[in-house]
Image (cartoon, rainbow, N blue to C red):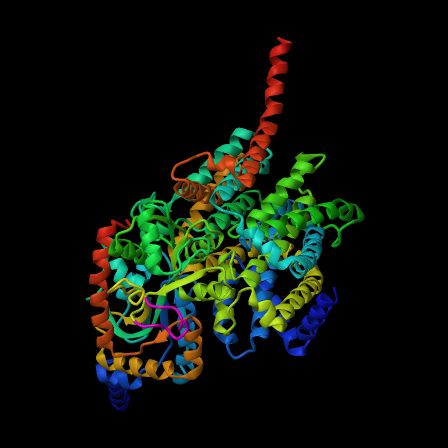
């Protein structure tokens, strides 16, 4: 009899333990390995940033943090994986503008919905693009460049790092806003694209900050403008596109964190506040700054709103340019 | 000259501190280990270890990461020679003659010559960086789309040289490889080609998948079939060291391989495999008996191994001096430099001389450490071959599958590798050679991209390939190679006709 009672107690105890409770989870969270899914191959800017964050998270929470690279199909494979992951707070998705804002319009049919199927956590960084020119091009300012391009339609080459990348679409936005005709030369990645401008094969590129800063400092490329609404601390003498005469021109490369759909709010808030704390650390700030970026840690709602507006904005540009990826 | 000497002294004083020596050793050993393990390569390892280096001073971090990179070149040749499994993509060419040598019981000499050749090449590569760094990097910039196209065409024509069977067979394999290389998304139009709606194929079939399948898995299947012959080979292990004849035959190959690798390593986007393949081609062309190649010619190991190690050193030049990364791994090293707060470019040499020269000195030291590490291990490696095959092959399969999966965490890659293994087995049975296919696979898409880019830039004018000097030179060379290959056949036919 006693044995049966203790057996029942055991069963009852186990049953109680397995009852899922959202708030209970949040209290014991994090209790196991956290996985940050990065939709790029190891070594890119986003991958390195994710690793910095992952290491700091590991230090502060004491739980192992693993970076899982799932590159492929323009980041849609990773996105699909995250959508299907359980919303228990152990899967984070480190994204940038391409994965969500651009892909939503670039692919005609995705196996997920870019807004509904993800829980936004926060916007992490924003970095500008910089328009750089090969020194042989006779234009010292953006206005001169526009005049030159208008006088030579179809003769100037503008490089970009691949169809649907931010460098490509920013170029398209520039061409349609100011009304010039330049020929796109696609490359596979930003390193070959920048090398092409260095050698003069292409005249210009809307480059990401790290190579742009390196080569403009060395005098090999001419910095024309940055594409953020305000000047950046990493290049204080370079005017913004708006200052240089292209009103309303804004193109920001941002990184953010998403989680699987229906993740409990308690967990999202916990991660958000922890990340905000990490992003205030001086050594993290320094590393992000080295990439030319600025921290923009905000609330989950900020990312949600930003995603929506970005998808709309780039959707229009993608449609106008006719780019598609399938 | 005294300037150079001062710089070198500075460099060695930085590299020889106990901490930096330790990091060099760790990097080189780790590099060798991942070079031996199939699948995971230096780029993944460097990315994983990058956060761990944040706490280190930049010089130590770079020394360790660089050690991983060129250490992997040493390690990759070990498995290529022992079990026909290219641990690194650049060791595919070493599989051809290295494995043949191993089957003749000469794995020891093969491994030793690979290590020694790599040491020589590494030293020369380092010297080149020291003496000619910046001007050489400028040369790399002269390569534009037309030159790349012509170089790739030359490469495709030479791919047939890799085969020692019928020429039509070889060209057929090259074209098959080309077709396989087309799978994926087109860079220019964004359309998916040959993907059959499978998302994972949008970026094409991975090179590692094809190489492991065609070489490693196919070899396992074929060996299992010929059980008796297999056991014969493993029991017959001749000496561990190269004979004097071996050394005499190899030193020319080592020199030439170093030259080829040093130059081609500078060209952004070429990669170590193109360098080792180019060296193999040169050796086969210059050999008195080209028929020996593919059956255990030691020049076929010495040349390519020297080439890919020389390339591993000289790829640093454009990155360190101009801030231009030639390969994906260099782009990662660039990122590492930036994260440590050192924007790479011409000013690195002047503003951070201890970093630049310390790194160079440690690269030389690293090569030395690697040889000292690898040579004694040869005895152990050769013993691995004597493990009964029924234990060896499951281990190889397991490591390979884990390695392939670790690339993109995608099980489709493993399945594809298995399918390529079956295909490779079919090729062995039909007497077709996988090496030209692999080259068509790599060079074909590169050629197509650059061809279209060149035509885009010239606005459709095809004469651009002939008006640029280097491009014209490559095309003429390709035509010459083609003629040399076909001429004997033509002559034979004419003689036959004349006889009648």
State whether residue B472 is above or below residue A247: above
- Find the residue positioned furthest to the right: B244
Foreground residue among B109 and B126 = B126
- Find the residue positioned furthest to the top: B500
- Find the residue positioned furthest to the bottom: A2
- Is A88 placed left or right of B58 in the picture? left
- Is B244 placed left or right of B110 in the picture? right
- Residue B270 pos. (x, y %): 53, 50
Q: Magenta stretch containing residue A233, yes or no? A: yes
Foreground residue among B6 and B249 = B6
Q: Which residues are magenta?
A: A230-240
- Residue A82 pos. (x, y %): 29, 66
State whether residue A178 is above or below residue A56: above
State whether residue B422 is above or below residue A213: above
Which quadrant of the view contains residue B37?
A: bottom right
Which quadrant of the view contains residue A297?
A: bottom left
State whether residue B306 is above or below residue B19: above
Q: Magenta stretch containing residue A260, yes or no? A: no
- Residue A43 pos. (x, y %): 45, 64
- Is B231 placed left or right of A46 in the picture? right
Q: Quadrant of the N terminus of chain A?
A: bottom left
Can residue A17 be seen here?
no
The residue that appears at 59% across and 32% down in the rendered structure is B481
Foreground residue among B166 and B274 = B274
Give the tally of numbered discs. Answer: 0
- Residue B41 pos. (x, y %): 52, 60
Can residue A257 be seen here?
yes
**Magenta residues, dominant SS class:** loop
The residue that appears at 51% across and 59% down in the rendered structure is B324
Which quadrant of the view contains residue A248?
A: bottom left
């Amino acid at each position: 009899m006693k044995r049966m009672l203790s057996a029942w107690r055991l069963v009852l105890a186990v049953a109680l333990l397995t009852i899922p409770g959202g708030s209970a989870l949040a209290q014991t969270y994090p209790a196991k390995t956290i996985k940050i899914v990065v939709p790029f191959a190891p070594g890119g800017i986003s991958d390195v940033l994710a690793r910095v964050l992952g290491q700091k998270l590991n230090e502060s929470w004491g739980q192992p943090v693993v970076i899982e690279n799932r590159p492929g199909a323009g980041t849609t494979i990773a996105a699909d994986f995250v959508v299907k992951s359980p919303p228990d707070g152990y899967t984070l998705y480190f994204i940038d503008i391409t994965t969500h804002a651009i892909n939503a319009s670039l692919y005609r049919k995705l196996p997920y919905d870019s807004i509904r199927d993800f829980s936004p956590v926060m916007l992490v960084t924003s970095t500008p693009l910089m328009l750089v020119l090969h020194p042989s091009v006779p234009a010292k300012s953006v206005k001169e460049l526009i005049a030159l391009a208008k006088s030579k339609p179809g003769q100037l080459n503008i490089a970009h790092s691949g169809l649907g990348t931010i460098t490509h679409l920013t170029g398209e936005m520039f061409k349609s806003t100011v009304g010039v005709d330049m020929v796109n030369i696609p490359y596979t990645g930003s390193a070959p694209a920048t090398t092409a401008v260095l050698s003069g094969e292409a005249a210009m590129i809307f480059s990401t900050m790290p190579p742009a800063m390196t080569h403009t400092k060395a005098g090999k490329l001419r910095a024309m403008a940055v594409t953020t609404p305000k000047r950046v601390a990493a290049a204080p003498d370079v005017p913004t596109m708006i200052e240089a005469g292209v009103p309303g021109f804004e193109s920001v490369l941002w990184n953010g964190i998403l989680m699987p759909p229906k993740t409990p709010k308690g967990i999202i808030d916990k991660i958000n506040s922890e990340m905000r704390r990490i992003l205030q650390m001086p050594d993290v700030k320094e590393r992000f700054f080295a990439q030319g970026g600025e921290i923009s840690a905000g609330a989950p709602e900020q990312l949600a709103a930003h995603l929506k507006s970005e998808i709309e904005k780039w959707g229009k540009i993608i449609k106008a340019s006719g780019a598609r990826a399938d | 000259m005294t300037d150079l000497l001062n710089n070198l002294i500075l460099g060695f004083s930085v590299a020889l501190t106990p901490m930096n020596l330790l990091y060099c050793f760790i990097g080189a050993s780790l590099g060798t280990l991942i070079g031996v393990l199939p699948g995971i390569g230096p780029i993944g390892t460097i990315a994983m270890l990058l956060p761990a280096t944040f706490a280190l001073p930049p010089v130590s971090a770079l020394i360790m990461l660089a050690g991983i990179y060129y250490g992997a070149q040493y390690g990759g040749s070990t498995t290529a020679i022992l079990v026909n499994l290219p641990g690194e993509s650049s060791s595919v060419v070493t599989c051809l003659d290295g494995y043949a040598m191993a089957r003749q019981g000469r794995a020891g000499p093969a491994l030793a010559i690979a290590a020694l050749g790599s040491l020589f090449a590494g030293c020369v590569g380092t010297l080149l960086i020291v003496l000619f760094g910046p001007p050489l990097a400028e040369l790399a910039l002269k390569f534009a789309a037309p030159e790349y196209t012509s170089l790739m065409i030359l490469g495709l024509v030479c791919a047939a040289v890799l085969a020692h069977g019928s020429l039509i067979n070889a060209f057929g394999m090259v074209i098959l490889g080309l077709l396989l290389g087309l799978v994926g998304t087109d860079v220019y139009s964004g359309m998916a080609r040959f993907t059959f709606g499978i998302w994972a194929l949008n970026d094409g079939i991975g090179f590692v998948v094809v190489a492991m399948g065609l070489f490693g898995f196919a070899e396992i299947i074929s060996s299992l079939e010929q059980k008796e012959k297999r056991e014969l080979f493993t029991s017959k292990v001749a000496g561990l060291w190269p004979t004097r004849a071996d050394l005499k035959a190899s030193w020319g190959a080592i020199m030439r391989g170093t030259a080829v690798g040093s130059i081609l390593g500078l060209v952004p986007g070429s990669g170590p495999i193109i360098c080792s393949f180019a060296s193999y081609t040169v050796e086969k062309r210059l050999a008195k008996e080209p028929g020996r190649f593919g059956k255990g010619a030691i020049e076929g190991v010495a040349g390519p191994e020297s080439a890919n190690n020389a390339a591993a050193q000289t790829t640093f030049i454009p990155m360190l001096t101009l801030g231009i990364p030639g390969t994906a791994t260099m782009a990662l090293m660039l990122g590492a430099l930036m994260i440590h707060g050192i924007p790479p470019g011409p000013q690195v040499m002047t503003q951070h001389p201890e970093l630049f020269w310390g790194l160079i000195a440690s690269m030389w030291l690293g090569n030395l450490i690697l040889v000292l590490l690898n040579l004694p291990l040869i005895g152990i490696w050769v013993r691995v071959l004597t493990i009964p095959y029924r234990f060896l092959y499951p281990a190889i399969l397991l490591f390979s599958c884990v390695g392939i999966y670790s690339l993109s965490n995608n099980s489709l890659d493993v399945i594809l590798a298995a399918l390529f293994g079956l295909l490779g087995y079919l090729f062995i049975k039909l007497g077709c050679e996988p090496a030209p296919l692999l080259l068509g696979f790599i060079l074909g898409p590169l050629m197509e991209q650059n061809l279209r880019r060149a035509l885009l830039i010239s606005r459709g004018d095809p004469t651009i390939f002939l008006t640029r000097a280097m491009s014209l030179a490559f095309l003429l060379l390709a035509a010459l190679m083609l003629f040399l290959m076909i001429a004997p056949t033509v002559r034979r036919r004419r003689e036959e006709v004349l006889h009648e």
